């Protein structure tokens, strides 16, 4: 029996036009193994979270929740701001986790990667994200850890990822995410 194509939803936590993380996510689309597709959701246009509006969120948040729900797995590509998760990404995570009992993230397999101009390649932001996954009940892939350090040297002016080692790690991360997702879906009823 042929397996159905797996949909991965990729979200980069930067709005910057020349963002390394958005570029890394675009580069990742070229590295997806057969049998899976990687769609990109851009976070621009999502307002600051206001709990007064959580039951009737803005259209872009409703779209985010629908896209997360429709995906088999999630790939978060995070920058690191002040040793942690950028507000843009955390804000989107918070919106899609609400209202209580209606989180779009619940039970989703997830992989993390990130690029920073610093020497630790978003390590601290990634570990903070992994802490957030505990409360969201997401299922993270542990390895490989894809931390693209010194990002200014790893991309060309057009945003192409040049680093062969980073590309190998990304391929492995995707492959592990796909295998992990299939494992988690085994025994669960087929989704409509
Ligand atoms: C508010 C702010 C805080 C930052 N803090 C960190 C940090 O803690 N660690 C780090 O490696 N880089 C830090 N940087 C630099 C980012 O790595 C760099 O701006 C990177 O390009 C952001 O990702 P992007 O290119 O996807 O937008 C910070 C940048 C900003 C704007």
Image (tube, rainbow, N blue to C red):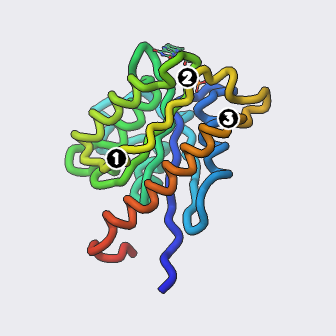
Q: CA distance from mark 2 to mark 1?
A: 21 Å
Q: CA distance from mark 3 to mark 1?
A: 24 Å
Q: Residue at 47% x, 46% y: name it.
A: 75
- Up-down relation of residue 167 to residue 189 (above or below): above
State the image coordinates of residue 163 (x, y, percent, origin top left).
Answer: 67, 35
Residue 70 seen anywhere in this rendered image of the structure: no
Which one is nearer the viewer's eye here, 123 or 57?
123
The C terminus - image quarter:
bottom left
- Up-down relation of residue 7 to residue 89 (above or below): below
In terms of image quadrants, where is residue 95?
A: top left
**The furthest residue to the front:** 165
Q: Residue 140: give its label.
A: 1
Q: CA distance from mark 3 to mark 2?
A: 14 Å
State the image coordinates of residue 17 (x, y, percent, origin top left).
Answer: 68, 27
* Ligand 1 lies under 8 Å from the Cβ of mark 3: no
Q: Residue at 78% x, 26% y: name it.
A: 157
The kind of secondary structure element at disc 3 is loop
User: Badge 2, how many Cα within 10 Å: few under 14, some, many 20+?
Assistant: many
State the image coordinates of residue 109 (x, y, percent, origin top left).
Answer: 36, 53
Mark 3 near mark 1, Cβ–Cβ under 8 Å?
no
Q: Residue 116: give its label.
A: 2
Mark 3 or mark 2, whichever is nearer to me: 3
Location of mark 3 (residue): 163
First in sequence: mark 3 vs mark 2? 2
Mark 2 near mark 1, Cβ–Cβ under 8 Å?
no
First in sequence: mark 3 vs mark 1? 1
Mark 3 or mark 1, whichever is nearer to me: 3
First in sequence: mark 2 vs mark 1? 2
Which one is nearer the viewer's eye here, 93 or 121?
121
Which one is nearer the viewer's eye here, 133 or 164?
164
* Ligand 1 lies under 8 Å from the Cβ of mark 2: yes
């Amino acid at each position: 029996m042929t397996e159905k194509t797996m949909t991965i939803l990729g979200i980069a936590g930067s709005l910057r036009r020349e963002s390394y993380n958005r570029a890394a996510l675009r580069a990742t689309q070229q590295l997806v193994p057969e049998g899976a597709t990687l769609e990109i959701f851009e976070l621009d246009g999502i307002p600051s979270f206001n709990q007064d509006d959580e039951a009737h969120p803005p259209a872009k948040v409703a779209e985010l929740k629908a896209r997360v729900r429709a995906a088999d797995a999630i790939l978060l590509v995070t920058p690191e701001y002040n040793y942690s998760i950028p507000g843009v990404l955390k804000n989107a995570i918070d919106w899609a986790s609400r209202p209580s009992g209606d989180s779009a993230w619940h039970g989703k397999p997830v992989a993390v990667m990130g690029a920073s101009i610093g020497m630790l390649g978003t390590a601290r932001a990634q570990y903070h994200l992994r802490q957030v996954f505990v409360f969201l009940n997401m299922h993270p892939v542990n390895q490989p850890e894809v931390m693209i350090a010194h990002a200014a040297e790893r991309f060309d002016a057009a945003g192409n990822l040049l680093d062969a080692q980073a590309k190998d790690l990304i391929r492995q991360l995707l492959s592990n995410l796909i295998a992990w997702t299939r494992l988690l879906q085994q025994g669960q009823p087929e989704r409509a």
